[in-house]
Amino acid sequence: MEHLEHSLGDLFTDLHLSGIWPDEKAISDSILLIPAADILRAYHAEKAKGTVDLKAFYNAYFRPVIPHESAYHTDPAHSPKQHLAAIWPHLIRPADDPSERSSRFALPHPYVVVGGRFQEAYYWDSYFTQLGLLKSGQSALVRDMLDNFAYAIAQIGHIPNGFRSYFLTRAQPPFFAQMVQDYGRAVGDLPTTYARYLPAMQQEYRYFIDSPHSHHGLARYWDDASGPRVEMYGTDLEAQHKGVPDGYFRHLRAACESGWDFSARWLTDPQDLTTIRTTDLWAVDLNCLLLRYEEILCDASDDPSYRQAADLRRAAISKRFYSAETGYFHDVLIADGTPNLLTTAAGMFPLYAGAASQTQAETAADWMQQHLLAAGGLLTTDIASGQQWDHPNGWAPLQWIAVQGLRRYGLHDLAESLRQRWLATCDAVFRAHGKFVEKYNVLDPLAPSTGGEYALQDGFGWSNGVYLDLAD
């Protein structure tokens, strides 16, 4: 595993600032054909002669990562389920070669990639991908993925955002305990599964509880690094050159840990990314996932402290994240403890986690129906900021969370309406384009989704998994 931003020095910077690559992540993921020190020496020798043709130099010393699934072509005769069964093998990767010279964090077992530009495993994507794998009878592959995650926890103390060197300073929404529980139930042996992964679950839980993630007893998103992101190095260096507020890059990175990169959810001005303030908010979804973690650890161990922690967190979510003004759940401003009254799909996580009273669940469902439910599914927020985790976009994991939360509180008609709307959106896009994509426009499913730092990606792990689970 290479930290290319260090080992390639000024060459890495020059590649990112060149403007040659439309997606900078391709630079950060490249495979080096010879040791980095030798490449850097060659670059300095070329620079001493005059202007360097960066594209030609790159082609001589690097190999780009090619998406395997790009070779797959949709069979027009396939139904959506047949298509997903056919594309899974193109998203599966064997155990990594640890001798590869790249930013890849080598995993010892096979795994599933997201697809498109994301040719490595990602943390919370893997939970929703796993839903589909279990529906497809691929429990052995799910166990490989769990073993990879346990390996990562043993190596670095947590599961990273994604398995690249530049992702290791942050995690993502912590679904590992739920992955373990779902797998154990699917194979019919929950006690043995718990015993196998209990040390890893306990270690990851402590990562969120004993670190800056935990602030005055509740949790926020965080990143241990505070400089420009390596995967978008040129973009961030240019922003730094123009001038950004203190703490900007940590807030930016923390939003990446949330998975919501980026959204008006984190901004004081929805039209201005420099107003980002992610670490200043207790995140409603993160606290709900830690509640689920505490409940599962209580089931998996004989330690009563997990039950006590879960009871305290459940009460705090119900009291502090719920607004009587809206009847909905929101992130909370750490500075004064008041809800940040922006309506987002994250407000459905308390229903999923069972942290709401029945009355709170019903008022939250009403608010969601009024402000976020669209013809094609659940809007991410009700603000059209131009960011990809905002109106008019809908994302598979948030649909699934909301459906499960509504079902948990007996709100079956609304859950069924949302389920059918989302499946119809996926079906419409598949019929029109022959693929499943990263995100969808839920106002007009056949119109493109908008926003983001890169083009709309095909694949797509969590869209595939959620579709298979909700269609069953």
Image (cartoon, helix red, strand yellow):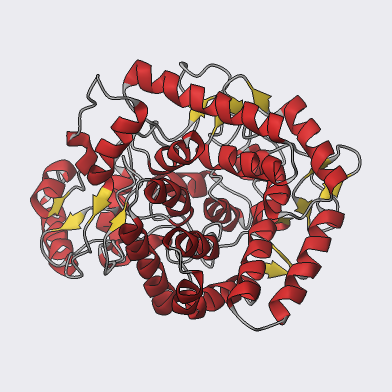
Q: Is residue 370 above or below residue 144?
A: above
Residue 85 locus on image (x, y percent)? 29, 38
Residue 7 versus residue 298: which sits nearer the camera?
298
Residue 108 locus on image (x, y percent)? 26, 69
Find the residue positioned furthest to the front.
188
Q: Residue at x 58, y 37 (%)?
A: 399
Q: Residue at x 24, y 19 (%)?
A: 76
Residue 400 versus residue 221: which sits nearer the camera?
400
Residue 4 locus on image (x, y percent)? 29, 62
Find the residue positioned furthest to the right.
324
210 to the left or right of 304: left
Q: Quadrant of residue 368?
A: top right
Residue 344 versus residue 296: which sits nearer the camera?
296
Q: Quadrant of residue 152?
A: bottom left
- Residue 392 visible (yes or no): no
5 to the left or right of 363: left
Q: Quadrant of the N terminus?
A: bottom left
Residue 2 locus on image (x, y percent)? 27, 67
Residue 307 versus residue 105: which sits nearer the camera?
307
Q: Residue at x 40, y 67 (%)?
A: 149
247 to the left or right of 7: right
- Residue 226 visible (yes or no): yes
Q: How many marks?
A: 0
